[in-house]
Amino acid sequence: MENAAIAAVFEEMAELLEFRGENPFRIRAYRNGAKAIRDLDESVASILADPTRNLSSIPGIGKTLLDKTETLVATGQLPQLEKLRQEIPEVVIQMARIPGLGAKKAAKLQQELVIESLGDLRKACHEDRISKLKGFGGKTQQAILDGLAIAEAAAERIYWSDGDQLAKSIGKHMKSCDTISRMEWAGSYRRGRETVGDLDLLIVAEDRDLAMDHLEAYAERSSTILRGDTKISIRVGKAFQVDMRVVDENEFGAALQYFTGSQAHNIHTRRLAKERGLKINEYGVFSQEDDHQVAGATEEDVYASIGLPWIAPELREDRHEFKWCAEENLPDLIELSDVCGDLHMHTTATDGAATLREMADAAIERNLSYIAITDHSKRVSMARGLDAERLREQWKMIDEVRPEYDGRLTILKGIECDILEAGGMDLPDDCLEEADWVLASIHYGQKQPRDQITERLLGAIENPWVTCIAHPTGRLINRRPPYEVDMEAVMQAAKRCGKLMELNANPARLDLNDVHLAAAKRLQIPVVISTDAHSIEGLDVMQYGIKQARRGGLSRQDVGNTRPWKEFKKLFKRG
Ligand code: DGT
Ligand code: CA
Ligand code: CA
Ligand code: ZN
């Protein structure tokens, strides 16, 4: 059994245990183990076979995981996983993603109505069978119908971050195939969409068959959907599809452009080509008159042939990119290395897993020069949110710790203060006034009508001590829709009051989304990209925020935390 397959087993264990609400430490142990094994550049099986080596000396692999790894390598199976899979059928996990349904009710429905797919569930709703069940009723049935679309989308599309992990694993596997001379990912993954429907790999290979054989040998492949002369589609894991196309060297750029999409972007490029007497397809750019090839080897050539500069994949949605090209104003998009501060993170004072010092050290390792500690306020009782007294204690501790980090890291006194259901902030103004940085966010009353939610956000923006609105729409991708809100009014108010807007980089949030980010850029409201880290590893999600920011067309200047704290401070008004 290869590393990737072992890692996938541990990842699935973590997922199923999480679904059952098991101990977070146990879940994290599986996740860390999966990551450690996936990142390992030697085969686990060969380490185990070597009596002079000890697998559990690798960080992330303790005694328990060592045992399980041995079982996996010896038998190709893990009894604990088989048992969990039986206990929790895939469809129950899918059903539990319907907002408000939850794991227990999903399991009950599945058993009582013998549901095998989300389609079965939809049918049961239409046939009015759920409303008649004990403990469910008509209201629940309607809520299920309303929420089914979210669960259906989640069953088909995965987070970009998960797609990235898979793409990197497949990429590593394919690199060892000598017949492949070029390789590039295309499709929505390359465009950085927040979710990915399937992965599209493009390669140049001397021996096409050998290259396809190599993909079929990928450890996590579960089946081959089709295999032709130039294209192969496989399934990985439970259901995820990966397409691979083999193209010629001289058409690689054209194919990459074509299969990166989006479809809307491609329709627009075809029109521009036509206006110049050219035609574009996946094989190249050709003269309409005599069919001779004008371009095709590189994407740069393809775009140049229709009078355009190379356009970053993240912008290829036919939203603003062609207008920006015409104005010779294509933005120079932000990069991860531009970021120097992180202004949203939690510690053990509330629901974080690491202490203030651990977060500070981890921030230095990630080349940050300032961070804000923003634990929850008291309304978030589930996370043991801070009241004014405990918050002031934390700030006292920050005062004590600061000298240790002098010249290395600025630690800001912050708070993620809830905007209460009835409006107003969860902590008194005199307390917020003492902070360096105040995030305002909504965690409760997300189902209120649009006007009410908008009013709450406007109230927070008008509070003199609030500096930034965190995860402004409250959505969880594939899990929970955004709340209803007049975002235009919120942004206008932020602009007027000199407040900033967050792009929460958590791959399940990515909130603001790409369209809202473009609006913030247009209104010249500085965006703050923050990790909302609840652990040290949580700081690494910054990269996903950067992807989303690029999709919104943001460059370095549009993002506040690319500036040192002294400059950043001038971007917002307080008092
Ligand atoms: P996904 O997989 O749903 O997340 O989204 P994409 O954009 O990766 O879509 P996919 O995998 O179906 O196809 C990849 C790209 O190939 C797509 O963005 C544009 C191009 N493409 C695929 N099929 C067609 C087609 O029938 N017409 C045109 N113009 N382009 C296509
Ligand atoms: Ca795709
Ligand atoms: Ca595809
Ligand atoms: Zn937070």
Image (tube, rainbow, N blue to C red):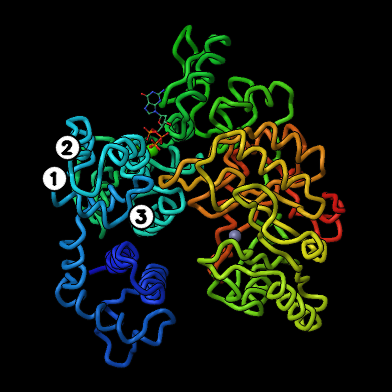
Mark 1 residue element: helix
In three-dimensional space, the C-alpha distance between marks 1 and 2, rounded to whole angstroms, equals: 8 Å
- Label tally: 3
> Closest to the observer: 91 or 550?
91
Residue beneath label 2, please?
129
Q: Along the polypeptide, which appears first: circle 3 or circle 2?
A: 2
Q: Mark 1 packing: few (<14 Cα in 10 Å), some, or many (20+)?
A: some
Mark 2 residue element: loop
Mark 3 residue element: helix
> Closest to the observer: 12 or 429?
429
Q: Along the polypeptide, which appears first: circle 1 or circle 2?
A: 1
Which numbered disc, 1 or 2, marks the residue closer to the eye? 2
Q: Is residue 440 left or right of residue 244?
A: right
> Closest to the observer: 518 or 211?
518
> Which mark is drawn over residue 170?
3
In three-dimensional space, the C-alpha distance between marks 3 and 1, rounded to whole angstroms, equals: 39 Å
Q: Along the polypeptide, which appears first: circle 3 or circle 1?
A: 1
- Whether label 3 touches label 2, CB < 8 Å: no
Query: Which x, y percent locates residue 157?
Result: 36, 43
Residue beneath label 1, please?
113
Q: Determine the image quadrant of residue 18.
A: bottom left
- Decide if residue 56 is in sight here: yes
- Whether label 1 touches label 2, CB < 8 Å: yes
Q: Is residue 189 above or below residue 71?
A: above
Tell me which amino acid carries mark 3.
Ile
Query: Which x, y percent locates residue 180?
Result: 36, 49
Tell me which amino acid carries mark 1.
Leu
Q: Determine the image quadrant of residue 426.
A: bottom right
Q: Determine the image quadrant of residue 356.
A: bottom right
Tell me which amino acid carries mark 2.
Arg
